[in-house]
Image (spheres, grey):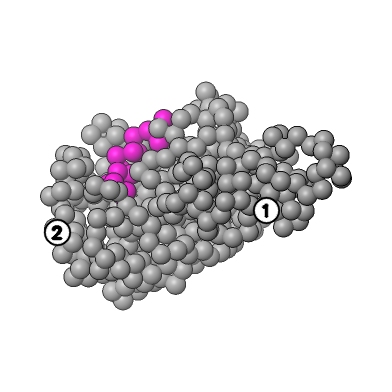
Amino acid sequence: MVADLKGLVDIDQGLLSRRIFIEPDIYQQEMEQIFARCWLFLCHETQIPKPGDYFTTYMGEDPVLVVRDSGGRINAFLNVCAHRGNKLCRAESGNAASFICAYHGWAYSNDGKLQAVPNLKDAYYDDLDQSKWGLTPVAQMDTYNGLIFATFDPDAPPLDDYLGDVKWYLDVFFNRREGGVEVIGGVHKWMAPCNWKLPADNFCGDGYHTGWSHLSAVQSGFGGDFRVKTASAGGKSVATGNGHCILTLGPDDPSDPAVPEILDYEESIAAEVRKRMGPRLDLVKPHVGTLFPNFSMLRSVARVFRVWHPRGPDKTEIWNWVFVDKAAPPEVKEAFRIVALRAFGPGGGFEQDDMDNWQECTQTARGVVSRRYMSNISMGLGHESYDHDLMGWVSDYRLTENNHRHFYDRWAQVMASDSWANL
């Protein structure tokens, strides 16, 4: 059943229907229109550095196997046996030359080819063309700054076009020093009883909630003391197009936790980073953002990036990684890991506040009467303009819902469009 999308998003008035956070028909259309067509984050190259290394993830609700084959090439396939549809690889990560289905023993090499089939000569009468029954590859796959993305849609624009002007902001997060970044530790996974769009839009530009929701976390010192220091009037929300949104601080605003190893490190590399990133870094300091639809990153306090995996209209599986500059010394990497656990891990002080809010926003949408009313995302409406220096639609003031409107405008466009050419 195709959902009726009319009137769900009114960007001109800054209004948003609460139906989009709970109704199954709308969720199913998201799976088809957004998650089966958009570029989605899979993993970072440093998670699969050697031939045979693999990582299992999801694109929407489709299981995906990302593997560096024996020749060193990175591939991504549906993690589904071509025989009867069983999930092929059950492990989260590892190293393997081949993958064997637990159901009937069909075996695949790490380049996706079907290698062996039990009883091929007798039960199949040697009449099965194995070349036609390999793993199903994604339609397109590409990388940027070590971030691996894929899409199931062969007609989707190239990744470079899809990212557009957000690429410079990604450079600040993931390529500010020679060698880029690496993922350290494993991945934290936990379930939140909320719709996936709520955390995605929170990371795309909600600076408004920090002083209220996170007051206890700020006062606890888990995230350092920068949030209680005096900030400049700088900092903007920047919507770079295609639904991608970045929230920035003023260029000299404090953003690092009060950990001596981190403060000393950031001071020591400041000149190098500014030279590498160029004069735009003298205008703003990117600190959190979302790539449409469900990949978010944070560099203030902690250095984390995450995926909001949809698990139904009212459930989101959060996957969270810690990243650091490859060139950083070991003690700095360890300091960032500890800070991330305290602030933005599943038990982090900031994380608990956010999940509580996202949960309640989802639960109220269950009400029949509640869904008759629109949510208000009108803050700063009419007080934004296109800024060529910052390469996006920029708010006049740092607190605004400019980015939210652009995120949901893109959501509505992709949901309603039957072709990339019409977007």
Q: Amino acid at mark 2?
A: Glu
| Direction front: furthest residue | 121
Secondary structure at numbered mark 1: strand
Q: Is 423 displayed left or right of 135 in the figure? A: left
CB-based contact (under 8 Å), mark 1 and mark 2:
no
For the residue carrying disc 1, how many other residues have a C-alpha within 10 Å: few (<14), some (14-19), or many (20+)? some
Secondary structure at numbered mark 2: helix
Residue at (24% x, 47% y) in the render: 178
Q: Is 335 displayed left or right of 355 in the figure? A: left
Q: Which mark is residue 294?
A: none
Residue 226 visible in rendering: no
Magenta span has 165? yes
Judging by the rendered image, the residue that carries numbered circle 2 is 267
Residue 251 in picture, x, y percent from top left: 18, 49
Mark 1 vs mark 2: which is more N-terminal?
A: 1
Name above or below for residue 6 compared with residue 203: above
Residue 209 in picture, x, y percent from top left: 37, 60
**Where does the magenta region start and end?**
161-175
Judging by the rendered image, the residue that carries numbered circle 1 is 100
Name above or below for residue 336 compared with residue 400: below
Residue 405 in picture, x, y percent from top left: 43, 42
Residue at (72% x, 57% y) in the render: 102
Residue at (86% x, 44% y) in the render: 122
Magenta span has 390? no
Q: Is 403 displayed left or right of 62 in the figure? A: left
Front position in the image: 388 or 125: 125
Name above or below for residue 329 compared with residue 204: below
**Corner quadrant of residue 366:** bottom right
